[in-house]
Image (spheres, coloured by chain):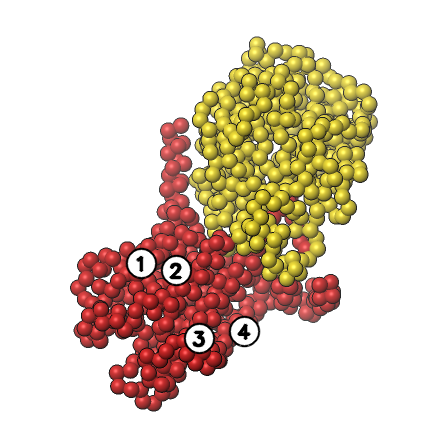
Amino acid sequence: MSKTIIIRKGLDIKLLGEAEKVKSGVDFASDFVIKATDFHGLTPKLVVKIGDKVKAGTVLFFDKNRESIKFTSPVSGEITDIVRGEKRKILQLNIRATTETQYEDFGVKDAGKLNADEVKNHMLTGGVWPFVKMRPIDVIANPSDKPKAIFISAFDSSPLAPDYDYVLHGENAAFQAGITALSKLAPKVHLTVNGAGAPDAVFANAKDCQINKITGKHPAGNVGTQIHHIDPINKGEFVWTVNAQDVVIIGRLFLTGKFDASRVIALAGSEVKAPKYYKVTLGTPVKKLLADALKDGQNRIISGNVLTGDQISADGHLGFYHNQITVIPEGAEPKFLMTKGWMEPGFGKFSTNRSYFSWLMPGKKYRMDTNLNGEIRNFVVTGEMEKVFPFDIYPMQLIKSVMYKDLDLMEKLGIYEVAPEDFALCEFVCTSKIDIQDVIRKGLDEVYTECM
Amino acid sequence: MKAIEKMMRKMEPDHHGKWAKFHPVWDGFFTFLFTPGETTKKGSHIRDGIDLKRTMFVVVMALIPCLLFGIYNTGHWHYVAVSGNFDLPYWDQIGDKIIYGALQVLPLVIVSYGVGLGVEFAFAIKNGHPIQEGFLVTGMLIPLIVPADVPLWMVAFATVFAVVLAKEVFGGTGMNVVNVALTARAFLFFSYPTMMSGDKVWMSGLSDVANSPEGFTGATPLGELATMATNEPIYSSIDAFSAKWSVWNSMMGYIPGSVGETSFIMIMLGAALLLYTGIASWKIIFSFFAGGLAIGYLLNATAVNGYMELDPVHHIMLGGFAFGAVFMATDPVTAAQTSTGKYIYGFLAGAMAIVIRVLNPAFPEGVMMAILLMNVLAPLIDHYVIQSNIKRRMKRLKTA
């Protein structure tokens, strides 16, 4: 156990609607969806067609460029639709689930006794490989790469995030099996826990990994922050990351031989009447979850958290990598300058600087809407991003280098170490309202096509 | 509010109609009245409450104390000039002074805003981009850094020059290299030196007074100090200077000078607002003063003439030093952008300002030059700061 890493920069955005620690089930829903768009940069190659019967674990499609990476069905049932977009690009597969889930049997395996290739093959055929992402670029890992380490964050510090200590409590066996499997793939597995409190036994007793402690404001829980402070990525190196909940899904594959993609998600946000936790399966429709659960008004439903999640409709589905559904009010109403706009005193307006009087109430929790709170401008204000960006990287200079596509400079300024989610807070505080995560994603794409 | 919004919507020019070109103008007014209902699409779904308008609004608020004091101070020195009585009590004839000062200063503000915003709107229409907020602050800064007597047409000229050549040609707010307000002042300073320096312009109305009493001069403390470094000093020693212009007077601002720059106290009020809200960089302000004081003490230690003996604390309260530190050097667009760079930039600018003042008697005041010079050098400072970050990363690669 190494010493605690203290993150001094960052920002905790206090929002209303934190999920109460109650797990509820949800009525059986039948129309599950796997969105190919959840996997950035993927060109899917279909294996199934409409009308095919699948079991949980049956391959739906694979990656055209890396054929060993397979995507499997989270439930058993029938393929009802394949939704395509422009140029017949596959957007999503709809699956009508049967009430009784049937699983493909991949065979029970003891990860501790397998070698790296066997673990890898088992994960690839079982459909859990897409849970492993790589840095740089922040896409699904290349099975052929040799990562220098695998990083797992044992907590999520983003606003209204689910509490992993609560969510994974009691999953010790599956979590440990997952860690053991991953430990075969890289020289080192780093499990980083929140140093502010005592982590749950599921993390504290984990073996086959190095446990690190980190404390501080968001983004201390982001795996990118942890990598940067524990073992930063240099050019030519790879680090893999897996979400803690997904480690459990990987573990279950080894323990039971089944692809059991159930997870506990938080339904949170100021517009949820009774925010709490739900046990659902990947690709679950949110419709039943949200029925009668929301307050009136125009709401935005987000799969994921408010900083990095995807906007979905009321008929939408839980994203592949998401552990929460957040509902906040839309803010499409123009705001008059004196009452709600830029000249108001601003007692209820959250801001990192103190130009609004909300600094008088430091403990207040906010009901924030999706209004941009201003217009898009050129960069003017400097120094604000540095306050919330705990990397030894110059955020604004990196963003600008991406904007004018200077690959050489991007590399030098540290593009290999970052993922769009690391810039979520920069985007939040930006006075000029620039979509920074989008810019960084474009930069990473550029690097991927040009340099890798 | 709904009624106003409805009215505005009615006036919105159609994007295909004959008034389409003027959409930015309408947009400028609409977004002034209403923060638009535009929402986030992806990425961060919530955004900080601040926008550029609020930022600029806070800076304008911070300038108000300087403006109000400047109005009164202009009135005071006008009555000193016409009466020829240098020792006229400061807080006397308050009403008269305010009225005179307001009549002298407010037209400057109106002309500066009117002309500057006119140019901004013209460019917005021509280029089809939205009106950007940068000029809200520039328009207030320009009247505060010129003598109250400067003719309005000159202010108009200088504003047009600065907005077009210092800002719009580079792409508007956020793209400029040098501070726009200081460019306006530099334009006036070099084009109409008789209206921007000497001993006739600093007391409003002095040039109209036919016969001043024997020994009466309208020079600023800095103008008088500049003579100390020449062969014809007007004071026998620096103590004689301090007897006439005490530290107290320059701290309160009871001295002649450009409209808004004289009162250290009022500037510090503005600085307090800017620093507390987090709008201005304390690093720049702090290091600017540190640079000025450091050079001041260095000159004290190596003094060969009376000017070099001036107390550095007195130095930074004279002229535009504090105003430059708080409102000019901190302009985020033209200052250094990296954290370390801000310290270096501020320190050098402050140091340079005092160096120009003391060692170059041709320019009694050096703050404007110093900041403009450092504006140009800021990218270079940033470059080296960033290079050190890059080197650190390269080193890690090698050891790994």
Chain of the residue under label 1: B
Chain A: its colour in the image is: yellow
Q: Are marks 4 and 1 in one subunit? A: yes
Alpha carbons under labels 3 and 4: distance apart: 23 Å
Q: Which residue is mark 1?
A: B292
Instruction: Point out which mark residue B325 bears.
Output: 2
Which of the two residues, B399 or A280, is positioned nearer the viewer here?
A280
Chain B: its colour in the image is: red
Q: Which residue is mark 4?
A: B114
Give x and y (percent) for residue A166: 64, 26
> Mark 4 Cα within 10 Å, few/some/many (few <14, many 20+)?
some
Q: Are dots 2 and 1 in contact, CB under 8 Å? A: yes
Alpha carbons under labels 2 and 4: distance apart: 27 Å
Give x and y (percent) for residue A66: 61, 27
Q: Nearer the viewer, mark 3 or mark 4?
A: 3
State the residue at coordinates (27%, 57%): B295
Q: Nearer the viewer, mark 4 or mark 1?
A: 1
Q: Are dots 3 and 4 in contact, CB under 8 Å? A: no
Please report whichever mark, 3 or 2, sits nearer to the chain's N-terminal start. Answer: 3
Q: Which residue is mark 3?
A: B72
Q: Are marks 3 and 4 in one subunit? A: yes
Q: Is the residue A376 above or below the residue A233 in the image?
A: below
Give, as a three-letter code, the residue at label 2: Ala
Give, as a three-letter code, the residue at label 3: Tyr
